[in-house]
Amino acid sequence: MDPVSTAVLLLHPITALTLIWLFVKQRRWRQQNLLLRGTERATALDVHQATGDRMMAAVIGVIALAFGAHIARASLEGLEATAYLVPGHFHGWAGLLGLLFMITLWRAGRKTRDLKLQKKSFAHTKELHGRISDVMMMLVTIHAFLGFLYLLKIL
């Protein structure tokens, strides 16, 4: 594979690794939540919520980058632009599943925030948000490993 194709294909995994690092860092809130108090906790919660919003946009960007890389790969190989768009492997389908989980995680976080602001019980949605995060971490780990194997196959 020529250097341009390789560079195009590596954009998705490199940005995805950055996003994984941010996700792991974001999950540290679960421990901080128990340790912080007062304004320090409120500030950390605001940062957690803002980071969650930015990460949702970043996930969509990383997935769009993957699709863009496959369109570019097809073009560079002289194929129809849509030749690689439909995932033919579990890594691609798991990415779309991960997007659904991320949307659910993000919405649960926003619902938790809204219920708290309305002074309603938010324990259930907070717990759901944490459990979805746990499932996401497992899925992200599997997805990254499968992506590495897929990358070895196509490079």
Image (cartoon, grey):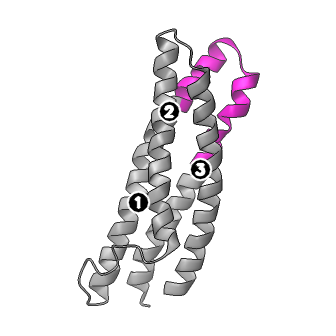
Mark 1 vs 3, N-terminal side: 1
At x 40% / y 60%, what residue is drawn? 63
Q: Is residue 8 above or below residue 28?
A: below
Residue, disc 3: 136
Quarter the N terminus occupies: bottom left
Amino acid on which disc 1 is placed: Ile
Q: Residue at x 58, y 47 (%)?
A: 22
- CB under 8 Å between callouts 2 and 3? no
State how far apart marks 1 and 3 are (Cα).
16 Å
Frontmost of labels 2 and 1 is 2
Q: Residue furthest top?
A: 119
Q: Residue at x 44, y 43 (%)?
A: 103
Which residue range is magenta in the image?
Answer: 22-48
Q: Is residue 59 left or right of residue 142?
A: left
Q: Residue furthest front?
A: 124
Tell me which label, 2 or 3, sits earlier in the chain. 2
Disc 2 marks which residue? 108
Callout 2: SS: helix
Q: Is residue 147 shown in magenta?
A: no
Which is the main secondary structure of the residues drawn in magenta? Answer: helix
Where's residue 147, x and y in %? Answer: 55, 71
Please tell me whether mark 1 or mark 3 is closer to you in this view. 3
Separation of residues labelled 2 and 1 (CA atoms)? 21 Å
Badge 1 vs badge 3, beta-carbon distance below 8 Å: no
**Gap between marks 2 and 3 measured at Cα:** 13 Å
Q: Which residue is mark 1?
A: 63
Name the one closer to the observer, 13 or 124.
Answer: 124
- Taking 144 as reference, is 84 left or right? left
Residue 30 forms part of the magenta stretch: yes
